[in-house]
């Protein structure tokens, strides 16, 4: 049975309010949660970017839900530090934490002052990081000299069962590549034909583990309000790779998105005041075989969305009885 999670967007909501939101989501009937891990928002209008790893400890303690995070090791984060963070949360909250690993975006990673590598180099770097993280979580002492460097690292605090390392992908090619190393796959909402192709590529290449989907939605009691929320908060997020990977600052995103038409936003966000339409969209994702669907209401106010979806959407997506 598909579980339905709440996506906590650190780029849009301050950490205290986000903690209150995820606690409210659990009370409203959400099964799980996940969060982003950004240093910078996508727009000055979003205006936040709390530190995900500090927040995750509080969120796991404050709720009983499983949590995931999407992280990009290799530049802003050394993989040994990410292994330590994963290991500590896994030891404190057994069976409740997973981490998705991806190649990242320049908007978060440029802060180190290091050059932003080509996509193929970023993928090779991530693959090295995955091997380092797995070895450390397995209790090995790790030394490594490559695109990342590690010298005699060892984790002294580890969980009995290492948390899942999930592959983050938005393209069919990356989904197929993730099958080499990942314990599951996560992607974002897209046309169902594309999602089906990604799933097939991952599974046909031997990909194991659960399938996660993050779904961007915008809901409000009135259609015009739902459209205005999506346009204000998410029009900087309509650009396909490599643009979204390579722009460096919120000012860049705000300039290139100044004239984005509203219809373009509706191509990447499920925008509707009709809760029944949201049920229909989500039923299509369930039928594709996703094991966990994390709902991201792109507005900064979450309570109305949580209450409405908890009462009117999630019950219609679960088997009767």
Image (cartoon, rainbow, N blue to C red):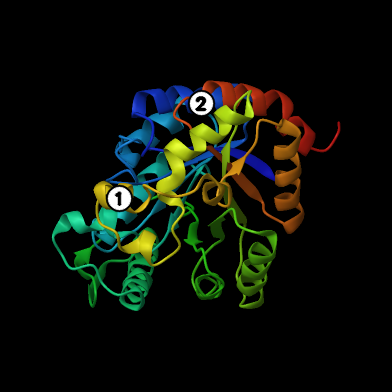
Instruction: Answer with the quarter of the image where residue 141 lies.
Output: bottom left
Q: CA distance from mark 2 to mark 1?
A: 27 Å
Q: Secondary structure at mark 1?
A: helix
Mark 2, residue position: 302
The quadrant of the image that shows the C terminus is: top right
Q: Secondary structure at mark 2?
A: loop
Mark 1, residue position: 255
Percent across and percent down for residue 278 are 70, 38
Apparent side of residue 289 relative to residue 19 in the rendered image (left or right): right
Label 2: few (<14), some or many (≥20) within 10 Å?
Answer: many
Residue 247, can we see it? yes
* 2 or 1: mark nearer the eye: 1
**Along the line of sight, the residue nearer the viewer: 5 or 195:** 195
**Along the line of sight, the residue nearer the viewer: 79 or 319:** 319
Percent across and percent down for residue 2 are 70, 46
Mark 2 or 1, nearer chain start? 1
**Along the line of sight, the residue nearer the viewer: 215 or 161:** 215
Question: Are the residues tagged 2 and 1 within 8 Å (C-beta)?
Answer: no
Instruction: Answer with the quarter of the image where residue 149 lies.
Output: bottom left
Percent across and percent down for residue 118 are 30, 75
317 up-or-down from 181: above or below? above
Q: Residue at (24%, 59%) from the top-left corner? A: 78
Residue 93, can we see it? no
Q: Residue at (83%, 38%) from the top-left corner? A: 319
How many marks can you see?
A: 2
Apparent side of residue 153 relative to residue 218 in the rendered image (left or right): left
Percent across and percent down for residue 301 are 47, 25
Residue at the extreme right: 321
Q: Residue at (64%, 66%) from the top-left corner? A: 194
Label 1: few (<14), some or many (≥20) within 10 Å?
Answer: few
299 up-or-down from 256: above or below? above
């Amino acid at each position: 049975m598909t579980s339905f999670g709440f996506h906590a967007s650190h780029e849009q909501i301050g950490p205290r309010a986000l903690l209150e939101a995820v606690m409210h989501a659990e009370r409203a009937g959400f099964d799980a949660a996940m969060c982003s891990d950004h240093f910078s928002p996508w727009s000055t209008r979003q205006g936040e970017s709390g530190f995900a790893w500090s927040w995750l400890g509080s969120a796991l303690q404050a709720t009983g839900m499983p949590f995931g995070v999407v992280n990009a090791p290799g530049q802003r984060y050394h993989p040994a530090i990410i292994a330590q963070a994963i290991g500590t949360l896994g030891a404190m909250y057994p069976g409740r934490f997973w981490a998705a690993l991806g190649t990242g975006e320049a908007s978060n990673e440029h802060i180190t002052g290091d050059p932003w590598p080509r996509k193929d180099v970023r993928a090779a770097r991530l693959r090295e990081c995955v091997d380092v993280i797995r070895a450390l979580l397995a209790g090995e002492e790790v030394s490594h000299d490559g695109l990342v460097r590690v010298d005699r690292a060892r984790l002294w605090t580890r969980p009995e069962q290492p948390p899942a390392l999930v592959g983050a992908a938005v393209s069919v090619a990356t989904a197929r590549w993730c099958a080499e190393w990942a314990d599951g796959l996560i992607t974002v909402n897209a046309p169902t034909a594309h999602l089906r192709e990604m799933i097939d590529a991952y599974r046909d290449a031997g990909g194991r583990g659960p399938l996660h989907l993050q779904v961007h939605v915008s809901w409000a009691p009135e259609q015009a309000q739902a459209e205005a929320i999506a346009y204000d908060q998410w029009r900087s997020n309509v650009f396909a790779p490599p643009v979204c990977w390579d722009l460096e600052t919120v000012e860049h995103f705000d300039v290139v998105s100044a004239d984005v038409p509203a219809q373009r936003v509706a191509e990447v966000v499920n925008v509707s005041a009709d809760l029944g339409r949201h049920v229909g969209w989500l039923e299509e994702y369930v039928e594709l075989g996703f094991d966990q669907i994390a709902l991201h209401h792109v507005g900064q106010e979450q309570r109305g969305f949580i209450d409405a979806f908890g009462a009117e959407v999630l019950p219609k997506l679960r088997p009767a009885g």
